[in-house]
Amino acid sequence: MEKNFDLFMSQLYETNAALDFYCDFEKIQNNVEEIAISLNTLNYLIGKQDMNAAIKRLWERDPKIFQVLDILIATRREDKKKYLLPDKSAKLICKLFDSPEGVLEFLDGTGLRKVFQNREIKNLVDYVFGVETGLDSNARKNRSGHVMENWVRDMFIQNHIPYRKEVRCEKLPDVKTILGKDIKRFDFVIPTTKNTYLIEVNFYSEGGGSKPSEVARAYSELSPKINGIKGYKFVWITDGKGWDGVGSFKEAYEEIPYIYNLTDIASFLELVKSEL
């Protein structure tokens, strides 16, 4: 197939995000549900002027409920976030939840004590639902890649093309020999009677930062290594306006023989089907 860079660029999608892309409310609800009992118990602190006494009363009933407090400042216990002490040393935030005094220090230091006492929060379950929604936005970059992978996977299925997903190079001895210590996992692998296609898939929306340029250079180096192995071909399926203005992408386009977007991927599908 004759390649045309300007045509390729004109075909790129502005986004691959449908409305359900922006928030995974099922995941958000599940996260809230896991700690809802503790949050409902902590609602007892809302409006209490003698916060120290209120904390001790809850502590006597169940000290474990305080283990969820870190989500109120949009962090998670497993993140192991730290805070700075007056002596310039650092301490894990979650360690504050090991005593009533630590809990009070947490509420004072973060400003949550005044928020509770002034009833600026009415219900911690509802509040944490909002926090989880905000945290979920951090997962959008990963979701964008998964959306693209799912689109490509569905095209393979619709065209009755057998594939393997997320294949590490250790499963491909010839490839592992060439790549050496580089640990590589290919998004898809498609074996045909003529070739084995090792496929990478990604999507970059506008404002992709430096990552697209790094990826383009990496694939420019990877492609000739793979294509130099008898019976193997490297394929890059990518899309998104994030490629506009990325100089290294034009170089990669010219150097990588098998590069497709969501519009011209049909030609790759036909090539594969002709070899099955």
Image (cartoon, rainbow, N blue to C red):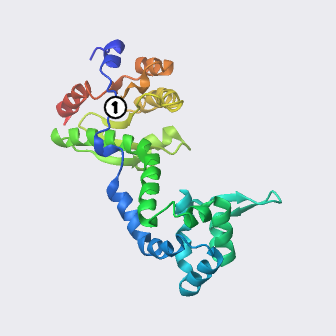
Report whether residue 146 is seen: yes
List the single residue furthest toward the bottom.
60
Q: Which residue is mark 1?
A: 15
Foreground pick, 131 / 276: 131
The x, y position of residue 46, in whole percent, is: 52, 70
List the single residue furthest toward the right.
87
What residue do we see at 67% from left, 59% from top?
82
Looking at the rendered structure, the number of numbered marks drawn on it comes to: 1
The x, y position of residue 2, in whole percent, is: 29, 14
89 over 49 or under it: above or below: above
118 over 222 or under it: above or below: below
Report whether residue 160 is seen: no
* For residue 93, side relative to residue 224 (left or right): right
64 over 26 or under it: above or below: below
Q: Residues within 10 Å of mark 1 (few under 14, many from 20)?
A: some
Foreground pick, 2 / 122: 122
The secondary element bearing badge 1 is classed as loop
Quadrant (top left, top right, bottom left, bottom right) of the C terminus: top left
Q: Amino acid at mark 1?
A: Thr
* For residue 113, side relative to residue 270 (left or right): right
Q: Quadrant of residue 88?
A: bottom right
Q: Quadrant of residue 188?
A: top left
The x, y position of residue 133, in whole percent, is: 42, 53
The x, y position of residue 11, in whole percent, is: 29, 20
